[in-house]
Image: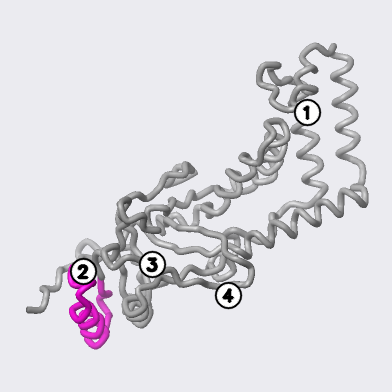
Amino acid sequence: MTKNSEQMRNAGEMSLYHYTKASCAKSILVSQKLRWSASIKLNDPFDIPQDLGINITQFKTALSEEFIQIIKNPLPVDTAATPIAQCLSALAKADESTKKLLIAKHLKLAEESPTKQQEDSWSRLIQEWKKFVESLRIACFSEINDSQPMWAHYADNHSGVVLEYKGNIRRNTPFILAHPVAYMNDSQTKAVVREYVKAIVNDLLEGGPHNMMDLVTKMEYRKTEEWAYEREWRIVRPVAASNPRYIDIQFFPEDLQSIYFGYKCSEKDICDIRLLLSNAYKYRHVATYRADLDISNRKLVFTMIPNRN
């Protein structure tokens, strides 16, 4: 991993920044809702893909290799929680010739063409994964507000705004549920087959779905390292299949802390947004800032705009 460690830590009450167009910011303020989009709307085509990127042959090979490792290194008897695990732990007493026969059998099974039953089971599994991914709705944020590429890509080429939110544990706001995205290199992304198989095998041995659930959660918060500059945090939740490709979730006005205007943001948009803030008592605590270019240091700097009397 780079940048972020892949541990599922919550945002708590840290600041999260949402880059957007000025017109979208106005809609967010009026509706007091933030849009969560379907994964298909994400700009990274490999972000929570509907296709797992593996086929049944790869899966069978990886599954055989996993069981071969268990045959070579049997489970301790006292950790065998299920009948399958108990059978495999009994291999600790097997002689080497028996282990070699079992290994040869698994190697042969990996080489055989999938049966019709296996193909049907694999097809159902893939369809269930696709259905699950299609149910996800995602809200994306960053832990920084001065990323020049993000201002260009998501905030209308510096003509838009950045909204700063901060969750509150006492109010149980959705922002406290945000997790950081883990950025992975090429070899790590290719290890998904092994991870997938390990999760299935471990659930069989332990008698519960928590390994697969943990893996699915991790996959919701993974991107390739090309996107690491975004320093993204996101909130992911499944919805009913009948929902459209997005949902609008209400937030507490107190969660909105500040609004940062891009250095190209028009005076009209700035006035419109500040008027929305001043006319709504619930937003009067929100601070506003204007971005400027620090030419010598080649970075963005922000200056607070005084509140109106």
What amino acid is labelled 4 in the image?
Pro
User: How far apart in space, not on screen, are marks 3 and 1 (Cα)?
Assistant: 50 Å
Split into 4 quadrants, where in the image is the C terminus?
A: bottom left
What amino acid is labelled 1 in the image?
Ile
- Residue 125, placed above or below residue 307: above
Where residue 150 appears, as percent x and y from the top left, is 38, 67
How crowded pointer 3 is (Cα within 10 Å; few <14, some 14-19, many 20+) is rated as many
How crowded pointer 4 is (Cα within 10 Å; few <14, some 14-19, many 20+) is rated as few
User: How far apart in space, not on screen, are marks 2 and 1 (Cα)?
Assistant: 58 Å
Asked which secondary structure carries label 2, the reply is loop
Please say if the residues under marks 2 and 1 sit with CB atoms less than 8 Å apart. Answer: no
For mark 1, what is the residue? Answer: 84
Question: Quadrant of the rendered structure where residue 279 is?
Answer: bottom left
Would you say 96 lies left or right of 150 here? right
Asked which secondary structure carries label 1, the reply is helix
Rendered image: mark on residue 244 = 4
Please say if the residues under marks 4 and 2 sit with CB atoms less than 8 Å apart. Answer: no
Would you say 69 lies left or right of 137 here? right
Rendered image: mark on residue 150 = 3
How crowded pointer 2 is (Cα within 10 Å; few <14, some 14-19, many 20+) is rated as some
Tell whether position 40 is magenta: no
Asked which secondary structure carries label 4, the reply is loop
Rendered image: mark on residue 286 = 2
Where residue 29 appears, as percent x and y from the top left, is 32, 76
User: How far apart in space, not on screen, are marks 4 and 2 (Cα)?
Assistant: 31 Å
Q: Choose the circle earlier in sequence order: 2 or 1.
A: 1
Give the magenta-colored segment's residue range: 260-285
Question: Quadrant of the rendered structure where residue 200 is?
Answer: top right
Q: Which of label 4 and label 3 is nearer to you? A: 4
Rendered image: mark on residue 200 = none
